[in-house]
Image (cartoon, rainbow, N blue to C red):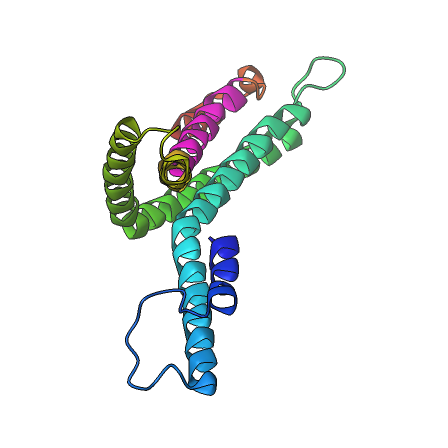
């Protein structure tokens, strides 16, 4: 998007025409007014492309943030394994047991905050992603059908234009789906981390707190 808009602004300098058809309330044959109009179209297009790209990527940034929080949670759960409560002689170290309980309670609060953040992000962006996915799917189907009726040998330029236009439509669908599956995988990893956290040496209260996670 940035490359297209940046180079699209150079079109008028080679063809002495506006990059985009647009009405202006003055005579474009005046050189100063013409180049002022060219610059206006170029800067507005660059800013619009920036806004569109950021709107598309903002939910992805937050989804990646949730993935990082979940992976951090899994690492902290797995680290409970390092604080074994057994002494070298096989007896229980009560101080380490208390430390593990406190850490586990902190992890429960940490997980609840992650869930709260996830719900806020879902509440804000779910409709946006749904509408974007719906229209991207519609455009994807339309361009795919268009490719079936265009002859590559007879109209190569149009075929390549439609084919390259289809790539960002695929990306707009594929990227949120990819990061959504990453969130699911990161959340499923919590169960594995819990299982490998030496819970069998803890008491009933610890195991009960473990079930809350």
Report if residue 173 lies within the magenta region. Answer: no
Where residue 154 appears, as percent x and y from the top left, is 36, 31
Q: Nearer the viewer, residue 33 or 106?
A: 33
Left or right of residue 15, residue 99 in this image: right
Q: Nearer the viewer, residue 93 or 28?
A: 28
Quadrant for the C terminus in the image: top left
Q: Residue at x 43, y 54 (%)?
A: 53
Relative height, residue 105 to residue 53 (above, below): above
Q: Residue at x 41, y 40 (%)?
A: 157
Residue range (magenta): 175-195
Report if residue 183 lies within the magenta region. Answer: yes
Q: Residue at x 48, y 63 (%)?
A: 11
Relative height, residue 46 to residue 188 (above, below): below
Based on the displayed image, in which of its 4 quarters is residue 101 positioned?
top right
> Taken as a whole, is the magenta stretch helix, strand or loop?
helix
Where residue 206 appears, as percent x and y from the top left, is 49, 26
Left or right of residue 196, residue 21 in this image: left
């Amino acid at each position: 998007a940035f490359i297209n808009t940046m180079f699209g602004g150079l079109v008028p300098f080679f063809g002495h025409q506006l990059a985009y058809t647009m009405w202006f309330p003055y005579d474009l044959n005046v050189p100063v007014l013409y180049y002022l109009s060219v610059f206006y179209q170029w800067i507005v297009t660059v800013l619009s492309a920036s806004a569109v790209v950021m709107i598309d990527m903002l939910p992805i940034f937050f989804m990646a943030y949730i993935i990082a929080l979940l992976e951090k949670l899994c690492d902290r759960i797995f680290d409970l394994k390092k604080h074994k409560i057994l002494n070298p002689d096989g007896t229980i170290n009560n101080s380490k047991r208390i430390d593990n309980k406190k850490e586990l309670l902190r992890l429960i609060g940490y997980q609840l905050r992650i869930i709260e953040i996830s719900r806020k992000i879902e509440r804000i962006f779910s409709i946006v992603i749904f509408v974007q996915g719906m229209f991207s799917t519609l455009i994807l189907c339309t361009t795919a059908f268009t490719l079936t009726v265009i002859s590559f040998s007879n109209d190569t330029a149009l075929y390549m234009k439609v084919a390259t236009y289809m790539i960002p439509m695929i990306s707009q669908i594929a990227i949120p789906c990819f990061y959504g599956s990453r969130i699911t995988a990161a959340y499923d990893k919590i169960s594995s981390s819990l299982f490998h956290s030496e819970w069998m040496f803890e008491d009933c209260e610890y195991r009960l707190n473990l079930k809350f996670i």
